[in-house]
Image: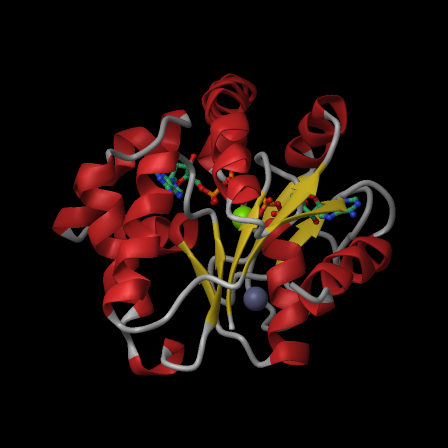
């Protein structure tokens, strides 16, 4: 099964993909994390992506699409995967459809996690992430057991550079502009399912799960 998780910054794409990964066995492929890993390692791709990622703008399609297609052609994605943060525009959605079709596969579902903008800003300002294992916390809604320390691996938690207020504003603007056309693209294909991203994490998981289980 190939699934894309759509949603504005802070909607809970990463949180839900991490939970559903164990349950569904679908690997979690996230372009944001791929970029951050390349930035940490100072690869050529990381150097090109860094100014875009840290200011909250989209990385150009010619860099992003190649990286993602490379990611999903890895053996662990042969039986399917859950994409988080890709596609962000119709061009990327088309590129994904073409790449899957070339392998005789297709996208099964596009799940849109919807959350009100004020709530997104609140969530992002309180987010802390583990640079080692990728676990995501929130000061208010999902605090770690020991403040500043990852429950899973004991590493020191960090705040993302793009969670600064100015970058958050840019991310919301950019993503809001692209959202409707992207939802329209998948609606026209009959693949779109909306899951409310408001409410407790487990409630959102139930809504996303219902989308996964829905008959086509
Ligand atoms: P990316 O890392 O994907 O950032 P994003 O889209 O802005 O999304 P986030 O990761 O911020 O939010 P999320 O939905 O995963 O929420 P989370 O689960 O963490 O991309 C970063 C950058 O990379 C982009 O800006 C761009 O530059 C580049 N990029 C990536 N993909 C690209 C593409 N396709 N094309 C071009 N450029 C690309 O949750 C947020 C917080 O809320 C956490 O603290 C969490 O604990 C908390 N939380 C989660 N659920 C709940 C809940 N139900 N109630 C209360 N709190 C909750
Ligand atoms: Mg994320
Ligand atoms: Zn960790």
In x, y percent, where is residue 145? 79, 62
Residue occupying image coordinates x 31% and y 37%: 91
Would you place residue 36 above or below residue 178 in this image?
below
| Between 119 and 104, the one nearer to me in the picture | 104
- The figure's colour scheme reads secondary structure
Q: Residue furthest left?
A: 44
Q: Quadrant of residue 79?
A: bottom left
Residue 159 visible at all: no
In x, y percent, where is residue 165? 56, 20
Would you place residue 134 above or below residue 9 in this image?
below
Residue occupying image coordinates x 77% and y 62%: 210
Q: Name the side, left or right, on which 175 lies relative to 114.
A: left
Q: Name the side, left or right, on which 64 lies relative to 196.
A: left
Q: Quadrant of residue 37?
A: bottom left
| Between 4 and 184, the one nearer to me in the picture | 184
Would you place residue 122 above or below residue 14 in this image?
above
In x, y percent, where is residue 179? 52, 29
Would you place residue 4 above or below residue 141 in this image?
below
């Amino acid at each position: 099964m190939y699934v894309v998780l759509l949603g504005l910054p802070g909607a809970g794409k990463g949180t839900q993909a991490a939970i559903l990964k164990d349950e569904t066995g679908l690997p979690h492929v996230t372009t944001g994390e791929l970029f951050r890993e390349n930035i940490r390692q100072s690869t050529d791709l990381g150097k090109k992506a860094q100014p875009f990622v840290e200011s909250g703008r989209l990385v150009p399609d010619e860099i992003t699409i190649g990286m993602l297609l490379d990611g999903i052609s890895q053996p662990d994605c042969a039986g399917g995967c859950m994409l988080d943060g890709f596609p962000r525009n119709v061009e990327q959605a088309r590129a994904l459809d073409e790449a899957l079709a070339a392998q005789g596969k297709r996208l099964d579902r596009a799940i849109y996690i919807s959350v009100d903008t004020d709530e997104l800003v609140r969530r992002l300002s309180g987010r802390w992430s583990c640079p080692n294992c990728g676990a995501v916390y929130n000061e208010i809604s999902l605090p770690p057991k020991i403040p500043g320390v990852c429950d899973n691996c004991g590493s020191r938690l960090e705040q993302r550079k793009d969670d600064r207020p100015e970058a958050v504003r840019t991310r919301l603007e950019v993503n809001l502009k692209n959202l409707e056309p992207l939802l329209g693209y998948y609606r026209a294909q009959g693949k779109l399912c909306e899951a409310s991203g408001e409410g407790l994490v487990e409630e959102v998981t139930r809504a996303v799960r219902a989308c996964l289980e829905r008959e086509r």
